[in-house]
Image (cartoon, rainbow, N blue to C red):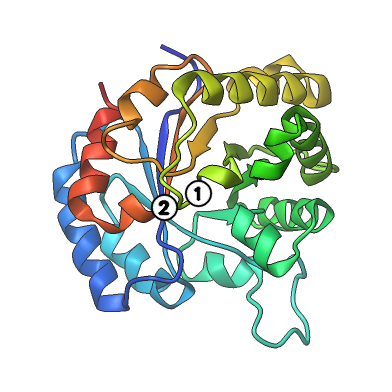
Amino acid sequence: MSERRRIVAGNWKMYKTLGESCEFIAKLAEEVKECPHSIYLAVPFTALQAASDCAKGSAIVIGAQNMNDATEGAFTGEVAAFMIKDVGARFVILGHSERRQLYGETSELVSRKVQAAQKNAIEPIVCVGETKEQRDSGQTEEVLKQQIEESLAGVEGDFVLAYEPVWAIGTGHTATPEVAQKAHAFCRSVLKELLGDAVANTTPILYGGSVNPDNTGTLIEQADIDGVLVGGSSLSLEKFGKIVHACTL
């Protein structure tokens, strides 16, 4: 068994009302109360406070899906690290492919966000991953190395890394366990080169990309895959519960 933490993280994206969130968490908490590893749920901003309250005393950790890099200021529509912490967020997803692809977020911006999260004692989950075009042209390792180096520039505290091949997110085309393991091993080698053996050996690296109850078991068996970042399947109590239990085996 690895010395690294095993994490099952759900990313709800722009789904679920406050009431739906609390109902889900209450039922999930009962189902996973004997779970030995960390269970994270990244909920919408509107549900953070209620979800955090609902999860108290359970194995479920509540976090946010994004945040601004600034401490505060005249940034209409944005949310700062201290704000999400104030309403119960204990982690935050940063650099998700949808933020990079749809909203033009750069790795340099991700780095500033990671540092802001750490200053507020919020654990960052830093996402990296290549597109189909980049993979098909043999650029996977080049892209991952650049994203990791730039996204973690100036970062000193603890973090979680998530490998999300963009071509597998929401497409149903999950990377095979072998492909995922190769990418995770490469990511860990970049961490070793960038931050040293201790960080590389203890930092959890999650796999994200069409994770479901059927493929979780074979993914989690891989030496460098320490957990999963789940999108669509995390919206279903039945599917997410099965994924959590598959990671326990």
Mark 2 element type: loop
Relative to 69, does residue 76 appear above or below in the rendering?
below
Q: Residue at x 62, y 53 (%)?
A: 97
Q: Residue at x 79, y 57 (%)?
A: 106
What residue did someone put label 1 on?
169
Does residue 49 appear to the left or right of 163 in the view shown?
left
Which residue is at 24% across, 56% downward?
236
Of the image marks 1 and 2, the number of the one nearer the N terminus: 1
Report helix, strand or loop for mark 1. Answer: loop
> Where does label 2 land, which residue?
231
- Say whether residue 246 is left or right of residue 89: left
Does residue 85 appear left or right of residue 155 in this picture?
left
Q: Position of residue 89 (x, y in %)?
A: 49, 61
Q: Amino acid at mark 2?
A: Gly
Q: Is residue 209 above or below residue 245?
A: below
Give the image location of residue 206, x and y in percent: 51, 34
Q: Which part of the image, by quadrant, shows the C terminus?
A: top left
**Mark 1 or mark 2, whichever is nearer to me:** 1
Compared with residue 9, is residue 206 higher up or lower down, i.e. above or below?
A: above
**Number of residues whose C-alpha sits closer than 10 Å to that of mark 2, classed few (under 14), some (14–19) or many (20 or more):** many
Please say if the residues under marks 1 and 2 sit with CB atoms less than 8 Å apart. yes
**Residue 71 percent coordinates (x, y):** 75, 70
Residue 95 is marked as: none
How many marks on residues? 2
| Residue at mark 1 to residue at mark 2: CA–CA distance | 8 Å
Disc 1 residue type? Answer: Ile
